[in-house]
């Protein structure tokens, strides 16, 4: 499905222009979450610019949007790595509990060794097997931790790039504000915007 996006006017009531990542999503939010008496005005004024925008602003918006996409995806991977790490920890804990119990039984068997050499050997067999089984989840937990750390670093870096792109975009937007304001005057007639809000106190 095609997502309507780009430079928009009155995305929020206290800003004139912003880069809008998803027009329909924001409009739906206004329709369902904003105070009912504000909805008509907000929906009437919230529009994507139709006129030709300064090319450097379009390019900065594209970079901003790509950085946002990468940032969101990195966050998703980070969350998933965290989930895997928690699950690996749970399996590890359970394996450790079994291992610990086998060790307890083994130690107990050691105490009655004098009474029964046979019991001692059998318990040792169980203990060794439990240790072998325990080693698998232990290694998986270590690897899950490493993946989690890497995903965290990627997420941080993506966040840094996103913030940089955001700053660059804001800079270009500010620089081109006179052109944008001129477009707004043409495309948004009878607008109550007073430079600060579309809801000026009367
Ligand atoms: Zn307006």
Image: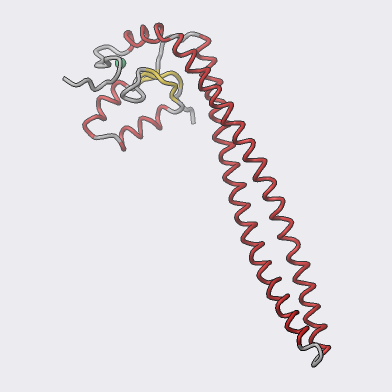
Seen at 76% across and 88% down, the residue is 112
Residue 72 versus residue 165: which sits nearer the camera?
165
Seen at 68% across and 50% down, the residue is 144
Q: Which quarter holds ligand 1? A: top left
Q: Quadrant of residue 131?
A: bottom right
Seen at 55% across and 22% down, the residue is 165
Q: Quadrant of residue 133?
A: bottom right
Query: What colouring does the structure picture have?
Result: secondary structure
Q: Position of residue 74 (x, y in %)?
A: 59, 37
Q: Position of residue 178 (x, y in %)?
A: 39, 6
Q: Is residue 17 left or right of residue 74?
A: left
Position of the C terminus, as image quadrant, is top left
Task: Say above or below: 172 vs 98.
Answer: above
Task: Say above or below: 29 vs 201.
Answer: below
Q: Is residue 62 left or right of residue 48?
A: right
Q: Position of residue 73 (x, y in %)?
A: 57, 36
Residue 44 versus residue 163: which sits nearer the camera?
163
Q: Residue furthest left?
A: 202
Q: How many marks?
A: 0
Task: Say above or below: 38 vs 140.
Answer: above
Q: Is residue 72 left or right of residue 140?
A: left
Q: Position of residue 166 (x, y in %)?
A: 51, 22
Q: Quadrant of residue 36?
A: top left
Q: Is residue 42 left or right of residue 143?
A: left
Residue 67 versus residue 183: which sits nearer the camera?
67
């Amino acid at each position: 499905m095609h997502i309507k996006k780009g430079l928009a006017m009155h995305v929020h009531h206290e800003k004139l222009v912003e880069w809008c990542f998803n027009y329909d999503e924001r409009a739906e939010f206004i329709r369902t979450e904003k105070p009912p008496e504000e909805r008509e005005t907000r929906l009437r004024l919230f529009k994507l610019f139709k006129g030709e925008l300064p090319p450097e602003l379009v390019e900065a918006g594209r970079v901003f949007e790509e950085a946002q996409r990468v940032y969101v995806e990195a966050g998703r991977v980070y969350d998933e790595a965290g989930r895997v790490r928690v699950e690996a920890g749970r399996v590890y804990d359970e394996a450790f509990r079994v291992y610990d119990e086998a060790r307890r039984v083994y130690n107990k068997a050691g105490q009655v060794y004098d009474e029964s050499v046979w019991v001692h050997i059998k318990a040792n067999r169980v203990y060794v097997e439990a240790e072998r089984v325990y080693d698998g989840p232990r290694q998986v937990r270590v690897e899950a931790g490493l993946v989690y750390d890497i995903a965290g670093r990627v997420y941080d870096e993506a966040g840094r790039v996103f913030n940089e792109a955001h700053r660059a975009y804001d800079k270009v937007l500010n620089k081109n504000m006179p052109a944008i304001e001129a477009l707004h005057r043409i495309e948004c007639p009878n607008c109550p915007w007073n430079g600060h809000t579309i809801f000026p106190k009367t």
